[in-house]
């Protein structure tokens, strides 16, 4: 069993979970993920590792409460435990000296981008971090990111912080700050990674994304996580999760991610509606 060391909502609907998993913490590298189960018979879900502490033997993941399994994970209390933490899985993000690297994070990807930006900085790169969100109240770990950034940029849809708009504004922003990255790395939801890759393609900037398809075993056995990269079929769990964003078949990935949407989201919504109905009856 894996003990819960910390569990809290860090911004609306976004949760941080720190678990005691010494074997995972000892081996973890930026860009890798774990597969968790909230209960014995539960669904297995992949989550990127956002941080780890080798001495304490802990790992931290950040996730959005979006379906029935993440809802169960978000409800975990300190000192309770979960039955499964498998990892670290996947290949580590390639960390070399590239020059200037733009690290883009959105949503849960802000968390998983942090150890990547830190490793790139340690390697001697000039690191620019860019966080994207609907509004500034959805940003977290800003101080942590700033500590490993030469420049930190924000984009908000409502204009409450930084530039207004979304990642499609990247060409204007780079012109404005007079920067030309040698590599872009994007972590976050599929739409952010797709849009980001679309915008860097004509600029011919090497762009890497961390793909997040549905997974079951995470070790190359089930084939559920298959993605099309150029002309090839790859398994995101063992061949990735990082791939060239300009080669990903985004439409197929978006379609495949919807496969269990009904089973995930409908019970969650139904149970919440039922909760509200019962509370209303009690009043
Ligand atoms: Fe089963 Fe990747 S999750 S092959």
Image (tube, rainbow, N blue to C red):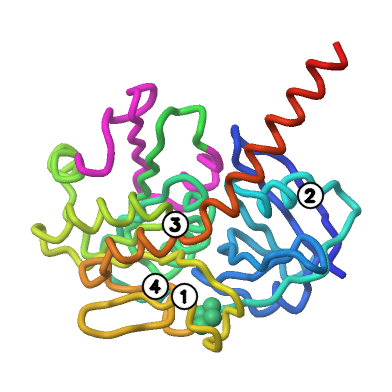
Direction from residue 28 to residue 73 in the image, left or right: right
Q: Which mark is residue 225?
A: 1
Snapshot quadrant of residue 181: bottom left
* Residue behind mark 2: 6
Residue 17 falls within the magenta-colored stretch: no
Which mark, residue 258? 3
Tell me which numbered mark, 2 or 4, is placed earlier along the sequence: 2
- Quadrant location, the C terminus: top right
Q: CA distance from mark 3 to mark 2?
A: 30 Å
Residue 211 locus on image (x, y percent): 41, 66
Quick one: label 3 or label 2, which is nearer the N terminus? Answer: 2
Residue 90 visible in the current orientation: no
Is the residue at mark 2 in contact range of ligand 1, meaning its CB lies under 8 Å from it? no
**Mark 4–mark 3 distance (CA, rounded to whole Å):** 21 Å
Q: Which element carries disc 1, helix, strand or loop?
A: loop
Looking at the rendered image, the disc whose residue lies closer to the viewer, 1 or 3, is 3
**Residue 242 numbered mark, or none:** 4
Say whether mark 4 is within 8 Å of ligand 1: no
């Amino acid at each position: 069993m894996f003990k819960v060391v910390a569990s809290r909502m860090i911004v609306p609907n976004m949760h941080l979970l720190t678990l005691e998993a010494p074997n995972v913490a000892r081996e973890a590298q930026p860009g890798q993920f774990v597969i968790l189960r909230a209960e014995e018979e539960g669904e297995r879900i992949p989550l990127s590792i956002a941080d780890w502490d080798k001495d304490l033997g802990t790992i931290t993941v950040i996730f959005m409460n979006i379906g029935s399994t993440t809802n169960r994970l978000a409800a975990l209390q300190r000192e309770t435990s979960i039955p499964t933490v498998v990892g670290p899985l996947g290949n580590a993000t390639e960390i070399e000296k590239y020059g200037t690297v733009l690290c883009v994070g959105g949503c849960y990807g802000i968390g998983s981008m942090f150890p990547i930006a830190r490793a790139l900085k340690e390697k001697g790169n000039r690191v620019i971090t860019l966080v994207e969100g609907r509004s500034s109240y959805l940003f977290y770990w800003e101080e942590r990111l700033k500590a490993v950034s030469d420049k930190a940029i924000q984009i908000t849809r409502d204009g409450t912080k930084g530039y207004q708009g979304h990642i499609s504004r990247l060409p204007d922003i780079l012109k404005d700050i007079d920067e030309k990255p040698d590599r872009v790395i994007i972590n976050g939801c599929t739409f952010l990674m797709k849009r980001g890759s679309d915008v860097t393609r004509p600029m011919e900037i090497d762009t890497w994304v961390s793909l997040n398809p549905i997974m079951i075993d995470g070790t190359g056995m089930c084939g559920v996580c298959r993605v099309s990269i150029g002309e090839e079929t790859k398994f995101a769990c063992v061949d990735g999760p990082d791939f060239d964003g300009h080669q990903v078949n985004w439409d197929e990935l978006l379609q495949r991610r919807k496969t269990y949407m009904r089973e995930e989201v409908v019970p969650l919504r139904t149970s919440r509606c039922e909760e509200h109905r019962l509370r209303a009856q009690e009043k």
